[in-house]
């Protein structure tokens, strides 16, 4: 470096950290783009009118959650209970199975008191169930198993005006027979 002028030495010492910063900035932008792309590939959850769902769903009922099966393993239940306790939904990697006791069968082949099992599709759009809560469920069958239909109005019946309105809309639509 003896033959290098002071201004050239200064340029060499500044350019290396600047190149590293530029690479780090590009890497950060790439990671941000990938993360944003993954988020946009999640559920669309575009809802169509409830009447359309009532007409098209093969199984429509209300029922109370009796048992979370989680693959029938204690470890699976413990893992999901831990994640739920801290507010995290983990259905992407593990999914769930759930036993429900039917309270009202609006559409399908079941009757009050029947116990059914529903399954997840291991998606981030899966519903999370809580024990002893009642749900309205829009269900369909795949390979002889019941699944909640995505982008439907399946939800907990919590006594809110929205819950009351949903059950009333179901009764009205089925009574009118459209």
Image (cartoon, rainbow, N blue to C red):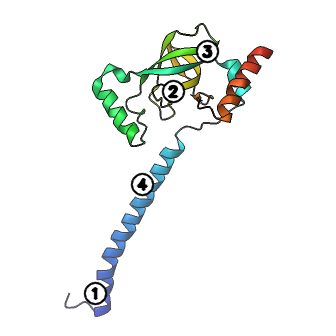
- Residues under labels 3 and 1: Cα distance? 81 Å
Residue in view at x 33 percent, y 19 percent? 72
Which numbered tag is attached to residue 104?
A: 3
Question: Depth check: 109 or 63 in front?
Answer: 63
Report whether residue 177 is seen.
no
What residue does disc 1 label? 9
Task: Choose mark 4 or mark 1, whichever is in front.
Answer: 4
Sequence-wise, the earlier of marks 4 and 3 is 4
Sequence-wise, the earlier of marks 3 and 1 is 1
Callout 4 secondary element:
helix
Q: Position of residue 124 (x, y in %)?
A: 48, 35
Quadrant of the rendered image containing residue 71:
top left
Sequence-wise, the earlier of marks 4 and 1 is 1
What residue does disc 4 label? 31
Callout 2 secondary element:
loop
Q: Position of residue 157 (x, y in %)?
A: 59, 29
Which numbered tag is attached to residue 133?
A: 2
Question: Depth check: 134 or 55 in front?
Answer: 134
Sequence-wise, the earlier of marks 2 and 4 is 4
Residue in view at x 72 percent, y 30 percent? 49
**Image marks 3 and 1: residues in contact by CB distance under 8 Å:** no
């Amino acid at each position: 470096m003896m033959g290098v002028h002071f201004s050239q030495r200064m340029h060499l010492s500044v350019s290396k950290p600047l190149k590293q910063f530029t690479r780090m900035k590009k890497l950060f932008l790439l990671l941000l783009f990938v993360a944003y792309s993954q988020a946009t590939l999640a559920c669309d959850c575009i809802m169509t009118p409830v009447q359309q769902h009532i007409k098209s769903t093969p199984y429509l009922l209300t029922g109370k959650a009796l048992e979370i099966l989680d693959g029938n393993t204690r470890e699976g239940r413990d893992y999901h209970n831990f994640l739920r306790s801290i507010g995290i939904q983990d259905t992407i990697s593990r999914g769930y199975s759930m036993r429900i006791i039917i309270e009202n069968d609006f559409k399908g082949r079941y009757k009050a008191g029947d116990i059914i099992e529903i399954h997840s599709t291991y998606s981030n759009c899966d519903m999370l169930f809580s024990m002893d809560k009642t749900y309205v469920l829009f269900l369909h069958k795949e390979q002889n198993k019941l699944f909640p239909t995505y982008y439907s109005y399946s939800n907990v019946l919590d006594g809110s005006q929205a819950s009351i309105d949903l059950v009333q809309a179901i009764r009205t639509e089925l009574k009118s027979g459209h």
